[in-house]
Image (tube, rainbow, N blue to C red):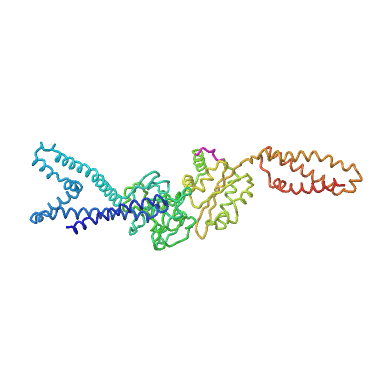
Amino acid sequence: MGKKRKIGNLPFIIWLGSLIGFFSTAGIGLRFQEFQKSNIYLIILFGFVAVGIISFILGIAINLYQRFIKKVPKKKQKNKIKLTLIFVLYLSLFPFVVVFEFINPISFIRTIKNNKLKQLFNKKYFGFVIKKIGKFILSLLLVTPIWGTFYLGVAIGADILINGSSVEIIGQSMLPTLENGSFPKLLYAFPFSKIEKGSIVVFQTGNTIKEGELTKFIKRVVATEGDRVSIRNGYLHLNGSILEESYTKKPRSTFGNSFLADCKEIEIPKGYLFVMGDNRAASQDSRELGFISAKDINSYLPISKQKIYQEKWRDASLDTENSFLPSFKIDSYYQGLNDYREKNNLKPFKTNERLEKAAQLRAQSIIDNNELSTDIDDQKYSPKKSLNDAKYYNTISAEINTRGYYDSEDLLSHWTEYKSITQHLLNPQLQEAGIGFAMGQVEGCDVQVIVQSIGGYVPPNYSESDIQSWENSLLKLKEILPSWENIRNYHEIYNNNKSDADRLIEIINIRISRIQTIVNKMRANQWLTSEENKYINEDASLYNEQEGIASRLNSQ
């Protein structure tokens, strides 16, 4: 009997260990955020949950078998259906069965009956009754929450495994399928899960950064290991053929980026996926991030379970026949851009012809020099050079650029997908803008480059102490100039020191002229030109030369 009890208790010991393991892992996850975001963390948690559920059910089954099945006469055991139903009923009410056996109410009632009701107030039997009632209440208080939590956990776990868990959609990259703020249910991705083309996946890598922080991205798998992908003239080519994509927001809206440029073909390596957003114009995906490891997938939704979204999709059967490149309207674009700024409490941009010229020069240069994937700092014709050639000389400027064909709405959506771009669009110090386009062929592929040049003026706001310092220097120079000019009236001294005297007077006049210009600009809160900044740098050496000559003349 002792061995049987040990066998029956072993699953509960394992269950208790699973509980300890689960909460310990959860605690470690709260302490170490990177571990909490990893797949290993989720696998360990699910492992403890699975082991706990299985061991708990197994422990109950063994105990019920020992307590119930073996006590049923062999003749009644032949009615297996009835026996199974009774077993399931006992299983569902197991904690109450345990309480029933623990309290043994039948024995309790018999004891009361045999001792008669009047004996209840006998000290011996009264204590017996109170003890039984206390055990009953205590047992219910302990068992019911555990059992209820167990059932709730099983129900939640089963729902997650069968129907998936909800994921919040932030952004526009998966339109029209998944809208911003929606909560679609995705299945948990186990190591053995097969992710097929068309699946929607949630993943996180070292490159999935939003607002300066690592985050999870949600995209669609368009190619798996062994597939060849390329982008040509706005279409995604899979293994040499244009892929029909009814889930994309607009036809002919797929263009290359830094990882996969237009008209370049790549093959997906083993264990990796190529993903894109359905709203190609506003998606940061494998075209920029590169291949995504299947191990980095947290959850997914197979194409077979996406029927509820198909009513949002287009008929893509005629995309290659009736699809035209989007038409860009500059007025609509600037209206949308300025609405975006005004929503962020900023003044609208003013269009500037010189900035438009600079943007046009830059766009054409990127095409001519095949610098679609080259960092701005490494490009032959720099933004600064284009501004100089366009004769735009404001104090601050910025540039953003992209490739592809966009309408006004899509281009703005594309810009706002990147924090590095929005910080320019929402910079209050930038007040003017110009946009330029250039089309041409790069490596046999038709490409369009779009450049947005932005500029603005920020007053220098010189400190009062700096201005007064220059004014004091100017005042002193004006005070000493007449006395040094008067040296020419002392013919003997002047003739003996003509070179030094003339040079000293020249230096004082040069410094007066320059400092007067500097003070005037500072008082007007205007930026100094490069020439005027040169004056400031040279003034210290002129002062030292002036003091040296004055010292020699005074010693005469």
Q: Quadrant of residue 59?
A: bottom left
Residue stretch rendered in magenta on the structure: 344-349
Q: Residue at x 22, y 43 (%)?
A: 140
Query: Relative to residue 296, is residue 406 drawn left or right?
Result: right
Residue 341 location in percent, x, y? 51, 40
Query: Relative to residue 271, is residue 78 drawn left or right?
Result: left
Among all residues in the image, which is located at the extreme front?
A: 123
Residue 388 location in percent, x, y? 64, 49
Residue 412 location in percent, x, y? 48, 45
Check residue 345 for magenta coloring: yes
Check residue 166 for magenta coloring: no
Q: Residue at x 47, y 59 (%)?
A: 263
**In terms of secondary structure, what is the magenta stretch mainly?**
loop
Q: Is 85 or 141 nearer to us in this picture?
A: 141
On the rendered image, what quadrant is the N terminus found in?
Answer: bottom left
Tally the numbered discs.
Answer: 0
Residue 99 location in percent, x, y? 19, 46
